Image (cartoon, grey):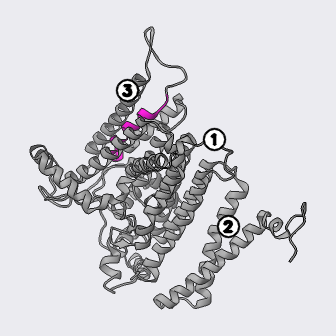
Amino acid sequence: MESPQKGQVNPLLALWGCSGVRWALGYMLVLACGVGLVYYWRVAYGFSMLSPAAATAAVCLAFSGVYGAVFLCAKFLPQKLWLKVMCLVVIAGVCFAAANPPLQAPDETGHFLRAYSLGSGHFTFEAGEDFPADVDALCEAFPGFYNRELIEPGLATMADGFTRYEQLKASGAAAPASTLVQQFLGYIPQALGVAAGRLAGADALACMYLARLANLLCYAALCGMALYMAGRFLPILAALMLCPVSLFMAASCSSDGLFLGAIWLVVGACLSPVATPKRTAALAAGFAAAFAIKVTAVGLLPLLWLRPAPPKPLRLGRRALRPWQHTALTAAGCLAAALVLYEVLSLYSARFSTITALYPDPAIQPLAQLVFILQNIPRYAAVLCYSMYRDKWNLFSMGGFGWMDMTVSFVSYFSPLVLLFSAGLSALEGARETLRTGVVMALTALLLYGGTYTGMYLTSTPYQLPEINGVQTRYLLAAFFAVLVLAAMALGRTMALQNLRPGPPQKTPPAWRMAHLAFVYGVICAVFLFQNYYIGIEG
């Protein structure tokens, strides 16, 4: 075969250069994956709930919907990273919302009940609140630990839960549901979804999915704002925003959706190349919201040291404030806003709550536990080190879903590699960071790890127990950011990338590559979650 002469264009390369052809070939690949997935289910799990044709059509239709949504975003929306990631978060999050059965996110029953109460116009916290019969039926049909207590012993399938829900809803024989949750800030987005569902006459199951969708949209909007402001380490931010744990919690009825979004907003504002009044206000609002939901967010304060000085320095009398004074003033303002919001919410809960039991386990005594820590600091240091060693710093437990009773090994194995890849994509800018960035990130990671483990020792661990219970990966995603930045700095300096001369910009920036990879990985993880709940548990 003769090679093309100089000046001629290879017809195959010209054809590949047409975006329509690439999209068409990609769609064919997606359909092939759908066909192969159904075949795998039938061979590996003996799946026979639907006929081969019906199952293949259903899976290919779902895959086509995801692919079509990505195509529309790519073709008709402005090509801006913050907008692209926001859309990808919504698409991948919807996959998780569909794959995750009702009320199977951690403590989702209590969170949904609080959101349902707020969405129904009840702004008090009543110990014996009377929920509608369909809400009671939903909570009884889908109890927590469904996988461990019903699916694994062979007592029921996940599909049985939907049948039982319809039966309990029709008979009205479900036991009354209740919740101990006494906060409402983290449930406002979900409450709006519930309110919309109730106005449309939707039942409890539909309201739950609408609450998940509203929570996801709020999280996506906060992620978009964070990336819009951030000027550094965008691949790491995009990877964490789109990681399976983040998507799973954002697409559930949980206050973690707003909490994680507020965390990324704080990180994005701290990494902003400019310090404008609007971005400072966003920083303060994000920090106050995160602190009001989980006080461990105080560990983010060292990141303020990375903010640049404002274009017009503030003046104290005739003297202009120095950069460190600006940082101290900003930190004081953020902390003051957080404390005021926290105190207002606490006073509101105390005034309008009839719930007396704060912890279901009487062995949990936060005040006595705190006194015990202060009296036995060396012992607690040993307990803390052992617990973090036992949990492998939570870096390899990202496949824990459900009420921590559903483990997807694929996610646990590959999530650390995907996140480490984001650090590799940030190695060049990591190599050019100063020592101050390394100190800030190390201090942030230590404060977040120590604060999270200590908080769980106070609120989720029986008195004087020599280990810490209840720590989950989702609590430490902000710490992961700091660790990954340190990894990027180490990788860059090891390879001496700081000595490279600036070259022409890449056709596809690293952050875009990471967003695409993290999105595809997130969708694959959602498929595995669906498979484990509805098709068969992995061996």
- Image check: 164 left or right of 15? left
**Numbered label attached to residue 502:** 1
Q: Residue at x 17, y 61 (%)?
A: 361
Residue on which the image places disc 2: 68
Residue 37 visible in this rendered orientation of the protein: yes
Q: Which residues are magenta?
A: 292-308
Tell me the SS state at disc 3. Answer: helix
Q: Quadrant of the N terminus?
A: bottom right
**Numbered label attached to residue 328:** 3
Which of labels 3 and 2 is toward the front?
3
Q: Quadrant of the C terminus?
A: bottom left
Kind of residue at badge 2: Gly
Which of labels 1 and 3 is toward the front?
1
**Numbered label attached to residue 428:** none
**Category of crowding for the residue at label 2, using alpha-carbon neighbours closer than 10 angstroms: few (below 14), some (14–19), many (at least 20):** few
Q: Residue 250 or 523: which is nearer the viewer?
A: 523
Compute the Cα span from label 1 to label 3: 35 Å
Image: 339 above or below 8: above
Residue 358 visible in this rendered orientation of the protein: no
Marks 1,3: beta carbons within 8 A: no
Residue 286 screen position, x and y as percent: 44, 41
Kind of residue at badge 3: Ala
Residue projecting furthest to the top:
318
Q: Residue 285 or 43: which is nearer the viewer?
A: 43
Residue 138 screen position, x and y as percent: 39, 71
Which of labels 2 and 1 is toward the front?
1
Kind of residue at badge 1: Pro
Q: Residue 520 or 129: which is nearer the viewer?
A: 520
Residue 110 screen position, x and y as percent: 33, 61
Residue 221 is covered by the magenta coloring: no
